[in-house]
Image: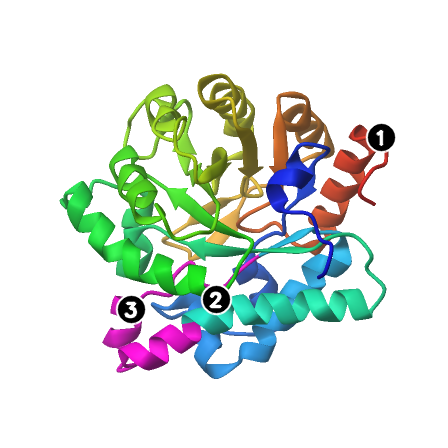
């Protein structure tokens, strides 16, 4: 959109609302995601469903749509018989689908700036075996960089506003991602999946966040796909260690029971927590797994009130 400020510019004046979980929005619309490609499968089979999911979050008040490319990789597509050229087209389509949703939202009356974040998920997401929540894949930083760089370059060429290096479980993988985004011409945020005060791989968060402190490409650092109760301390650490804007988009707080293949417990994602994250320095706030449009609408109301009503 002509005249839209960059995301970095927006962060200097207020808080930006991210969307929620892509998978739960697709599932609520009746789509089966029981597949190694997860939501990325719909890029090939039902791209309109992806656009509609993004549009639902924009309608709820999100300022940023995170693309359906989290589990979209050249290697993962190749296992399904999708050649490299087709895979590149699907990665590009993930950005175009979010752009189309933003266009429709503006046609529907949205006047605030809307941005697109291209999701770059961890290596473990491609494996589809849960290792994205453990890290420590047995690969070197150089090997991980070689895995990530082609996908990063393709997504960057599609023209997103920012690259979302997200759900990173391991400081070693973060180091590889920071190398992979160097020189691609698109800013990035780096967000870890954490447990308490450590990465999922067990490294102290001070060490993990510190990797991005001097990375010019990185405009924000923080956490996602974690328990809501773990977010506030991590936000404070990220702000103190890096001096950059902080991004936070936790899960709902419910627990996945792998034996029952169902979510259990109650959500702990509350307006009071959102206010605390904002007060602690988070300037990009949204939700991850099990956080839908209704909760994102609540986030928007909460943070815009905290910003003095700006950005509504």
Q: CA distance from mark 3 to mark 1?
A: 44 Å
Number of numbered discs overlaid on the protein picture:
3
Location of residue 25 (image quadrant)? bottom right
Quadrant where the C terminus sits is top right
Q: Is residue 197 left or right of residue 141?
A: right
Q: Residue at x 42, y 66 (%)?
A: 38
Labels 3, 2: front one: 2
What secondary structure is marked by label 3? Answer: helix
Disc 3 packing (10 Å; few <14; some 14–19; many ≥20): many
Relative to the observer, which residue lies in front, 242 or 128?
242
Say the numbered circle drawn on residue 158. 2
Residue identifier under label 3: 74
Q: Is residue 118 magenta?
A: no
Percent position of residue 172, x then y: 24, 36
What secondary structure is marked by label 2? Answer: loop
Disc 1 packing (10 Å; few <14; some 14–19; many ≥20): few
Location of residue 47 (image quadrant)? bottom right
Considering only vertical position in the picture, is 235 above or below 85? above
Disc 2 packing (10 Å; few <14; some 14–19; many ≥20): some
Q: CA distance from mark 2 to mark 1?
A: 35 Å
Range of residues picked out in magenta: 66-90
Q: Nearer the N terminus, badge 3 or badge 2? A: 3
Residue identifier under label 1: 308
Instruction: Confirm whether residue 33 shows in the render.
Output: no
Percent position of residue 239, x then y: 52, 22
Q: CA distance from mark 3 to mark 2?
A: 16 Å
């Amino acid at each position: 959109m002509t005249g839209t400020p960059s995301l970095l510019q927006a962060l200097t004046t207020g808080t930006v609302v991210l969307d929620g979980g892509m998978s739960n929005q697709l599932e609520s619309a009746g789509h089966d995601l029981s597949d190694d490609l997860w939501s990325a499968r719909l890029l090939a089979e039902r791209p309109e469903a992806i656009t509609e999911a993004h549009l639902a979050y924009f309608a709820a008040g999100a300022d940023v749509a995170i693309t359906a490319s989290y589990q979209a990789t050249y290697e993962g597509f190749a296992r399904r018989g999708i050649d490299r050229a087709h895979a590149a087209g699907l990665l590009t389509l993930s950005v175009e689908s979010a752009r189309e949703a933003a266009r429709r939202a503006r046609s529907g009356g949205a006047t605030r700036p809307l941005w697109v974040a291209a999701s770059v998920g961890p290596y473990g997401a491609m494996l589809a075996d849960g290792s994205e929540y453990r890290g420590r894949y047995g690969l070197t930083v150089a090997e991980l960089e070689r895995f990530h760089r082609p996908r990063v370059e393709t997504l960057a060429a599609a023209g997103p506003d920012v690259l979302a290096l997200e759900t990173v479980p391991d400081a070693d993988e973060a180091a590889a991602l920071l190398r992979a985004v160097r020189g691609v011409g698109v800013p990035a945020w780096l967000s870890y999946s954490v447990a308490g005060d450590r990465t999922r791989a067990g490294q102290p968060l001070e060490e993990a966040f510190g990797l991005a402190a001097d990375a010019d490409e990185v405009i924000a650092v923080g956490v996602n796909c974690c328990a809501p109760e773990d977010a506030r301390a991590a936000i404070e650490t990220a702000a103190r260690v890096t001096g950059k804007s902080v991004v936070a988009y936790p899960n709902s707080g419910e627990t996945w029971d792998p034996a029952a293949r169902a979510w259990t417990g109650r959500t702990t994602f509350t307006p009071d927590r959102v206010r605390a994250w904002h007060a602690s320095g988070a300037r990009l706030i949204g939700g991850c797994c099990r956080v839908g449009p209704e909760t994102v609408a609540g986030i928007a109301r909460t943070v815009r009130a905290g910003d003095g009503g700006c950005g509504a």
